[in-house]
Amino acid sequence: MPSRESHERLTALLDPATTVLLTVECQQGVVGPDSALPELAAAACSSGALANIARLVAAAHESGVQVMHAVAESRPDGRGGNRNARLFRAAARLPVQQHTGSTAVRVAPPIEVADEDLVVRRLHGLSPLAGTDVDPLLRNLGCRTLVVTGVSANIAIPNAVFDAVNLGYTAVVPADAIAGVPAEYTPAMVRNTLALVATVTTTDAVLGGWKRPRRQGAAATPA
């Protein structure tokens, strides 16, 4: 059980005024029922990660925490996309493509996208941060802590965490709100890699840290 000190430290890190919740590739063509990667979609669903991400997004909306959705997509002609790794070449042959404007690149249920959410789309690379608008947007928002959720624990999630740390943000990873394949790989990667550079926690712990009044309209002190 986490100590009171660790709980207080996590709560301080999760200050809604300086925290952004990032969902990574939580799009219908990746984690939805018609996924291009059915094994990954199944892992995200069966592990509870997708449901936990939806819980975190809902709580962020309620608590005044900025939500940002990072979506990976491609043009039908492939222009500007990477071809310098086996992963990219294999993805180009999949029956479901993450084409710009298609259903595949919409954020997947049960995650709800609010009007105030930011959706950042990329046409290249492996990271939602490198070479995208995410970093300048985070800086303009006054972000100090980035809560990283989504898929996959194999590639995009560690990329996001490493890039966030390299850019000076504090990364927080709810380990039950990320997924990868095979299922047993995710906890091993979290334990042996992400735990060295990020604050690893749980969805419930993050939700607990956000259970306090918003800065605007906070409840008045009882007489």
Image: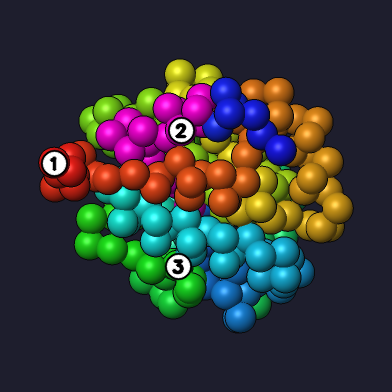
Please report the residue visible at 33 percent of the width from the left and 38 percent of the height from the top. 16
Q: Which numbered circle lies on residue 125?
A: none
Residue 187 in percent (x, y) is at 79, 45
Q: Which residue is mark 2?
A: 11
Query: Quick one: label 3, few (<14), some, or many (20+) residues within 10 Å?
Result: some
Write down the quadrant of residue 3 in the picture: top right
Horizontal relation, residue 152 to residue 82: left or right: right
First in sequence: mark 2 vs mark 1: 2
Q: Which residue is mark 3?
A: 111
Write down the quadrant of residue 131 in the picture: top left
Horizontal relation, residue 200 to residue 68: left or right: right
Q: CA distance from mark 1 to mark 3?
A: 39 Å
Q: Which residue is mark 1?
A: 223
Please report the residue visible at 32 percent of the width from the left and 31 percent of the height from the top. 18
Q: Amino acid at mark 3?
A: Ile
Q: Is residue 63 magenta?
A: no
